[in-house]
């Protein structure tokens, strides 16, 4: 993982944090990390060893190569029982058992939203990795069903370990030093969180927001949080075509603390992706009392659990109507905030770690490492 993690990087960091909280006495965890400082939160005596590994190059390709060389070599030389691969693909070689985390099947469901290189890599290796793994971890029933429909014979090896909420996103009532002013009074703008890439559906979100701004000079501004992604030419055109570009602000990648503050000032989160395997921003926003608009028919609906406004992500009109409804109805925002906080409390990284540990124990119940 990198010092500025998104998606899989956040999953890896928080799974390790959750593991340290569960602290299973019968299992030893060794984390191979190109940036060990990302795990500086681990307390002494946690039973988790973090080892520095050097990558061929500091990018996705460097991590992919390391997965099939450095990770495999280290696991083999130290006689590891199981290698847990957190990013879709387990090492190809080695005599150890494998468990793999498959976050989604976007490369199959929406191949047009990713690059040719990534699409080819995942199409080539994810299926092989699933077949070679003793346990296949997913974070939602939605993804479990998708994998089983694609590869019916691997169903018995699938285990669901829902993700959680990072400790930085504590509920307001749990903060040691709450803000002096009511957060509800500070909410002014709408918020988008996600890498700027096609699957996040930002083009339609911008179109819907632009339509509302065209007819209402006081409609809330839209703040965009997320680093530059890929195949983003359409997003740039949509930004240029917005009816009032001054009411769209690009904030780029933010730290966890900065993102928490954005949730606190937002009237609502717009997370209307074409497809997701989970959707961490939904839980983050809910934990902060920020109402959510998200997509119907993907894992986001499962994660939201009835505590969000749902839209068809390919229908710009539905996104527009949901935005207008959320902005215009204070009672609805209050209801969604309350239901969202309740829903978010059902998820935690310690539970995710516990479910993951149980899946690993099933592979080698009599072994320790």
Image (cartoon, rainbow, N blue to C red):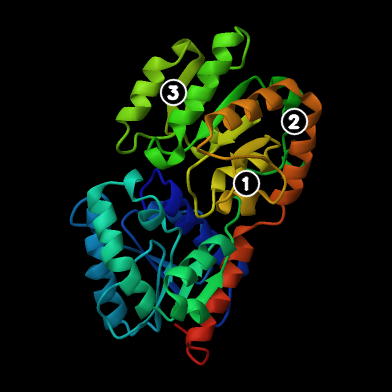
Q: Are marks 1 and 3 in contact (CB under 8 Å)?
A: no
Q: Quadrant of the C terminus?
A: bottom left
Q: Nearer the viewer, residue 152 or 156?
A: 152
Quarter of the view holding residue 93: bottom left
Q: Nearer the viewer, residue 280 or 293?
A: 293
Between the C-alphas of marks 1 and 3, the distance is 22 Å
Is residue 24 left or right of 91 when viewed as pictured?
right
Decide which of tag 2 and tag 3 comes sooner along the chain. 3
Q: Position of residue 344 (x, y in %)?
A: 69, 49
Between the C-alphas of marks 2 and 3, the distance is 24 Å
Residue 140 seen anywhere in this rendered image of the structure: no
Q: Secondary structure at mark 1?
A: helix
Q: Position of residue 105 (x, y in %)?
A: 42, 58
Residue 293 seen anywhere in this rendered image of the structure: yes
Q: Position of residue 287 (x, y in %)?
A: 68, 43
Q: Secondary structure at mark 3?
A: strand
Q: Residue furthest top?
A: 217
Q: Are marks 2 and 3 in contact (CB under 8 Å)?
A: no
Q: Secondary structure at mark 2?
A: helix
Decide which of tag 1 and tag 2 comes sooner along the chain. 1
Q: Residue furthest bottom?
A: 366
Task: Give the residue at mark 1.
Answer: 283
- What residue lies at 22% left-to-right and 52% top-to-bottom? 117
Circle 3 crowding by C-alpha within 10 Å: few under 14, some 14–19, many from 20: some
Mark whose residue sits in front, 1 or 2: 2
- What residue lies at 57% left-to-right and 78% top-to-bottom? 358
Task: Give the residue at mark 3.
Answer: 250
Between the C-alphas of marks 1 and 2, the distance is 16 Å
Task: Give the residue at mark 2.
Answer: 333
Is residue 179 left or right of 357 when viewed as pictured?
right
């Amino acid at each position: 993982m990198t010092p500025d993690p998104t998606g899989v990087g956040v999953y890896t960091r928080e799974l390790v944090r959750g593991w340290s909280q569960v602290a299973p006495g019968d299992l030893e965890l060794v984390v191979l990390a190109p940036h060990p400082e990302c795990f500086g939160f681990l307390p002494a005596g946690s039973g988790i060893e973090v080892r520095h590994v050097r990558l061929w190059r500091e990018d996705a390709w460097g991590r992919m190569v390391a997965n099939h060389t450095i990770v495999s070599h280290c696991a083999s030389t130290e006689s590891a029982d199981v290698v847990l691969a957190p990013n879709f693909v387990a090492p190809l070689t080695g005599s150890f058992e494998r468990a793999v985390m498959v976050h989604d099947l976007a490369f199959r469901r929406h191949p047009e939203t990713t690059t040719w290189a990534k699409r080819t890599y995942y199409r080539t290796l994810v299926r092989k990795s699933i077949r070679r793994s003793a346990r296949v971890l997913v974070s939602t029933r939605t993804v479990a069903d998708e994998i089983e429909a694609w590869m019916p014979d691997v169903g018995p090896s699938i285990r669901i370990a829902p993700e959680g909420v990072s400790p930085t996103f504590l509920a307001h009532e749990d903060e040691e030093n709450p803000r002096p002013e009511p957060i509800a009074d500070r909410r002014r703008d709408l918020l988008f969180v996600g890498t700027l890439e096609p699957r996040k559906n930002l083009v339609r979100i911008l179109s819907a927001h632009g339509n509302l701004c065209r007819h209402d000079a006081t409609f809330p501004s839209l703040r965009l949080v997320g680093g530059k992604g890929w195949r983003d030419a359409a997003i740039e055109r949509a930004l240029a075509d917005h009816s009032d570009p001054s009411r769209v602000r690009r904030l780029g990648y933010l730290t966890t603390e900065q993102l928490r503050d954005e949730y606190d000032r937002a009237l609502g989160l717009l997370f209307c992706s074409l497809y997701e395997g989970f959707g961490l921003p939904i839980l983050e926003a809910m934990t902060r009392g920020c109402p959510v608009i998200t997509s119907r028919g993907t894992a986001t609906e499962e994660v939201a659990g009835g505590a969000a406004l749902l839209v068809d992500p390919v229908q710009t009109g539905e996104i527009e109507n949901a935005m207008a409804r959320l902005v215009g109805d204070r009672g609805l925002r209050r209801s969604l905030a309350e239901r969202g906080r309740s829903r978010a409390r059902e998820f935690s990284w310690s539970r995710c770690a516990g479910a993951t540990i149980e899946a690993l124990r099933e592979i080698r119940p009599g072994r320790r490492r």
